[in-house]
Image (cartoon, rainbow, N blue to C red):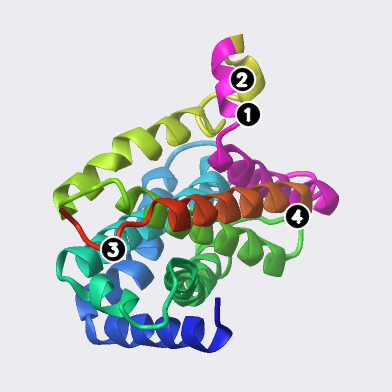
């Protein structure tokens, strides 16, 4: 693995995304728009529903968007033959995946900063802990989506198949992350499954920041999310094929 090659891959990806205005808009605008829509839905209802659901969805939206964009973009590299040409050069699979992870990680940082700024600054999300830590958690969630998107792209042969992986990898995590029903109130089997899903810890970290703001618990959850992301990247490097059949 070469740091110079990895950074070159990251620069190439960032240049491509900058030229693709639709993808850039999806990355930067969609999470903010969805958070705003959620706030608007709850605006006239009694209770602090936005403060209850907002943190979990602030963790969820960047995760979903980055998963979709990364999985489709990586598959496009293989189906177009770009990956095959790149790997004929002194470029390893891990260089490729880490380059993508760095590029989309930087995009995730911008995306999450915007989403947190809109949620806290414009929509009045009440945060007990430090706002900058809320941004750190949002970035970790987006990087997790990137890593899982890179992983699942290795098992798809078309962009449509890449999108089809979303129900298998994303929807169960959304249902079992504790946003709708506290995880400890779920049946024992579902709680056990929830305990091994990374999005559960992302939502826990967000809710902890808005509630009691136990920063040690937040950092512990962030470490778990980061561990899942690194594991997904390692698996992706082992399963990445040079081209789509």
Q: Are marks 3 and 4 in contact (CB under 8 Å)?
A: no
The residue beneath circle 2 is 192
Observer-side mark, 1 or 3, equals 3
Which one is earlier in the sequence, the residue at label 3 or at label 4?
Answer: 4
Mark 3 vs mark 4: give the one in front. 3
Q: Residue 131 versus residue 226: which sits nearer the camera?
A: 226
User: Of residues 177 and 97, which is closer to you in this image?
Assistant: 97
Name the residue rendered at 44%, 29% in the picture.
175
Using residue 151 as the reference point, say whether residue 69 is left or right of it: left
Could you tell me if residue 52 is visible in this image? Answer: no
Discs 2, 1 touching: Cβ within 8 Å? yes
In the displayed structure, does residue 49 sit left or right of residue 166?
A: right
| 168 to the left or right of 22 | right
- Determine whether 172 is above or below 38 in the image: above
- Identify the residue shown where x is 48% and y is 66%: 115
Q: Is residue 216 left or right of residue 92?
A: right
On the image, which quarter does residue 45 sit in?
top left
Residue occupied by mark 1: 195
- Marks 2/4: CA–CA distance: 29 Å
Q: Secondary structure at mark 3?
A: loop
Label 4, on which residue?
Answer: 128
- Residue 2 appears anywhere in the view: yes
Mark closest to the chain's N terminus, 1 or 4 = 4
**Earlier residue among tags 3 and 2:** 2
In front: label 3 or label 2: 3
Identify the disc placed on residue 242. 3
Q: Quadrant of the N terminus?
A: bottom right
Residue 121 vs 125, above or below: the answer is below
Residue 6 placement (x, y as % from top left): 49, 81
């Amino acid at each position: 693995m070469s740091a110079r090659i990895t950074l070159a891959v990251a620069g190439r990806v960032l240049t491509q995304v900058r030229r693709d205005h639709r993808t850039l808009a999806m990355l930067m605008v969609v999470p903010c728009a969805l958070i705003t829509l959620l706030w608007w839905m709850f605006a006239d209802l009694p209770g602090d529903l936005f403060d209850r659901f907002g943190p979990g969805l602030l963790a969820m939206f960047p995760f979903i968007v980055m998963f979709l964009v990364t999985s489709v973009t990586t598959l496009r590299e293989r189906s177009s033959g770009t990956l095959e040409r790149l790997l004929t050069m002194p470029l390893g699979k891990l260089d490729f995946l880490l380059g993508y992870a760095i590029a989309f990680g930087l995009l995730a940082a911008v995306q999450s900063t915007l989403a947190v700024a809109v949620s806290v600054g414009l929509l009045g999300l009440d945060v007990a802990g430090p706002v900058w830590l809320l941004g750190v958690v949002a970035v970790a969630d987006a990087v997790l989506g990137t890593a899982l998107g890179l992983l699942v792209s290795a098992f798809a042969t078309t962009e449509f198949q890449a999108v089809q992986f979303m129900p298998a990898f994303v929807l169960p995590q959304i249902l079992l992350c504790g946003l709708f029903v506290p995880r400890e109130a779920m049946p024992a089997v579902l709680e056990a499954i929830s305990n091994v899903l990374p999005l559960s810890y992302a939502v826990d970290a967000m809710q902890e920041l808005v509630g009691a703001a136990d920063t040690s618990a937040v950092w512990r959850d962030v470490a778990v999310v980061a561990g899942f992301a690194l594991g997904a990247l390692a698996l992706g490097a082992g399963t990445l094929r040079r081209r789509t059949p």
